[in-house]
Image: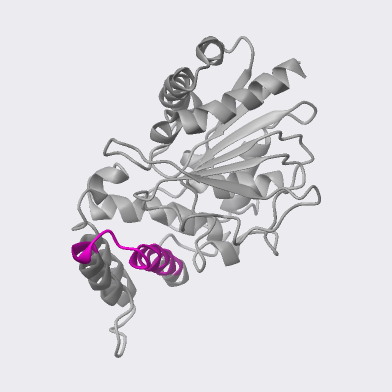
Amino acid sequence: MRPRLVFVHGVGRPRDAETVMEEWLPALADGARAAGHSRRAVELLDGEAVDLRCASYGDLFPAPGAPARGPAAPDDPAEDEALQDMLLDVVDERLAAPEDDHEARLLRQARNKLAPTGEQQGAGDIVRRLSAAANALFALPGLRTLGGWVSAGAMLSDLRQVRWYLARKHVDDAGTSIDQRIRARIAAEIDPVGPTVVVAHSLGTVVAFETLHRQSAQVPLLVTLGSPLGMRTAVHPRLRPQPVRTPAGVARWLNFWDRDDFVTGGTGLERCIAPNDSQVVPESRRVDSDGLYVHPAATYLAQPAVAGPLVEALEEAIDG
């Protein structure tokens, strides 16, 4: 039986499985070659040794401007408050150790726009503050390219997907919430019998984390890239189940983060995720990308520090 490798993408436009594979597999192969696994890199690309899968779910999110369905509309004020919390988490994390005085000043300006003192300005105030803060953050050198965003509006649109998932609303005609529908997509790709290595990115790390808590699958390695799981206000308290701990079937968890990745919630997950019964906790490792596009999964996968352990885990699963 071939081990299974499941990719779980993150925020952004709807993408089918084939498109994700076309982006992620070449990057993983490059990283594997750089880590000294040239032969396995070829096998990863052709699918001979590994059962390659991708869980695609972007099409399940409400389209911009779509009519509301279920008890919550995409512009629910409570969900906008969750997005505000997310941006505050990000700003506060970076303010703890800014690159220089210029970055610190821009971050403080963004924070003041997100959480101003004084009275509120009406129902639309939070939306105006989110837009103003996002534009202030875009003054940070390189931010629009770090995440691949072309505008502050595009950044907010992507981050709203995290908000929509964690709101656990947007119920369909069958009474199923959006987070349940998304997890069902991921669960369908997990091998119920044999080993499954899971590689998840961005929002996909949240989805994979919650899905694996509902599975009895063997997961010799969980790899999380650019994960917001550690965001102290916007994400971590909203995860299920609580208290937050490593899923039972995960034998090893590697979490990779880049300091310039705007989406990550700090340097490590060990501080906020308890071990499972096998005493497995996330092992957070920093990577530093040379290019401009830091957040995309392909940037992480091309790093030998990421691809090397991943290929080694697959080799062990193949040999075992």
> In the rendered view, does 241 fall on the left or right side of 86?
right
Quarter of the figure that contains the C terminus = top right
On screen, residue 319 above or below 125 = above
Please give the name of the residue rendered at 34% of the width and 38% of the height, measured from the top-left corner: 289
- Does 88 lie within the magenta span? yes
Please state the horizontal and vertical placement of residue 295, each as a whole percent of the image: 38, 43
Please give the name of the residue rendered at 30% of the width and 39% of the height, measured from the top-left corner: 293
Quarter of the figure that contains the N terminus = top right
Please give the name of the residue rendered at 52% of the width and 66% of the height, measured from the top-left corner: 232
Please state the horizontal and vertical placement of residue 8, each as a whole percent of the image: 54, 36
Please provide the residue range marked out in magenta.
82-103
Please state the horizontal and vertical placement of residue 256, each as a whole percent of the image: 50, 43
Please state the horizontal and vertical placement of residue 243, each as a whole percent of the image: 70, 64
- Does 21 lie within the magenta span? no
Return the residue nearer the eye: 135 or 36: 36
Which color mode does the image show?
Answer: one colour
